[in-house]
Image (cartoon, helix red, strand yellow):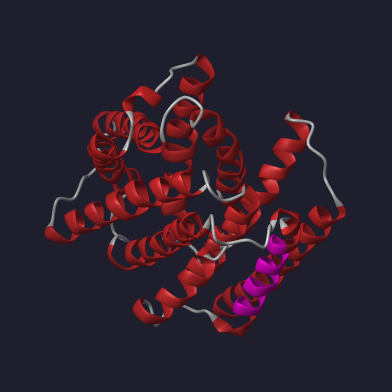
Amino acid sequence: MYILITVIWGTTWFAIKISLETFPPLIGGGIRFLVAATILGLVVWFKKLHLPLTRRAIAVYVYMGLFSCVFPFWFVNWGEKYVASGMAAVLFALYPFAIVIFTRIALPDESIGIRKVVGLIIGFSGIATIFSDSFTGTFNNNILGMLAILASAVLQGTVGVFVKRYGHDINAISLNFVPMFIGAIGSFFLALFFEDKSMVHPTVHGILSVVYLGIFGSVIAFTSYYWLLKRMNIVVLSFSSFITPIVALLVGWIFLNEYLTKNHFYGSLLVLIGLLVTNITFTRRKKLIAD
């Protein structure tokens, strides 16, 4: 499952780039979430899955819909219009650090440990190395785009911790269904006020990319993520955001004939070392518990 979400989310950067040529960020996001909500709703209905509607469950759905779907994806897509994709990847790689901070606040029983922090720092250094050639050094024209991407990472960090604490007893498919529906409605509503409808230029590639994002990027990847969230350490799980840029590089190399530089290899090695350091601690503790 862990490998699955890193592979899928590593390919979504390419799909988002294609979709933005056809749909503005909010409209494209709304279609993506509508596709995902439709599929998830059918699964819930056919399999007769339990869909909790308690006050706590509704709060979880609304929080996830707004702060995992509507605003983060809007911020990232909007921010990438002003920030180079490499810089965007580095900024969003601050997501695991947001997870650590909010975990310390809201989940004091969740194990973090010094080695996980060291692993995160090494992994982040790898991301910075990979995209070091993308740094322009000028911030006057893209500061708002950078802040938007940082805000997205922080919001996603709060959602991960919020779900870990309050949504642990909700089936992963049900947990994903309602927020995706809220994400679709919220995105379309905001698009009425903030986006130019004349910018919509439907193409086969654009439509297929949004459908791909809805099925793979939202239904499969997010459901898998929430399933994993209940079964593994949240800090280790957040490390997936360091691996997805590496997958994106490989996709560009294989399908777009993009070049791989020494920095790409050195940075990827640092990410893998950081992941190893983080998981060694996790594995040892699980073994001690088993013993």
Q: Is residue 71 above or below residue 232?
A: above
Q: Position of residue 256 (x, y in %)?
A: 74, 30
The answer to which of 260 and 182 lies nearer the viewer is: 260
The magenta stretch spans residue 2: no
Residue visible at 72% across and 44% down in the picture: 249
Residue visible at 30% across and 49% down in the picture: 175
Q: Residue furthest front?
A: 140
Dividing the picture into quadrants, the one containing residue 291 is bottom right
The answer to which of 173 and 290 lies nearer the viewer is: 173
Marks counted in the figure total 0
Dividing the picture into quadrants, the one containing residue 137 is bottom right
Residue 90 left/right relative to 149: right
Q: Does residue 162 appear anywhere in the picture? A: yes
Q: Which residues are magenta?
A: 116-128
Residue 222 left/right relative to 116: left
Q: Position of residue 199 (x, y in %)?
A: 40, 25
The magenta stretch spans residue 121: yes
Q: Position of residue 48 (x, y in %)?
A: 24, 35
Residue visible at 46% across and 57% down in the picture: 144
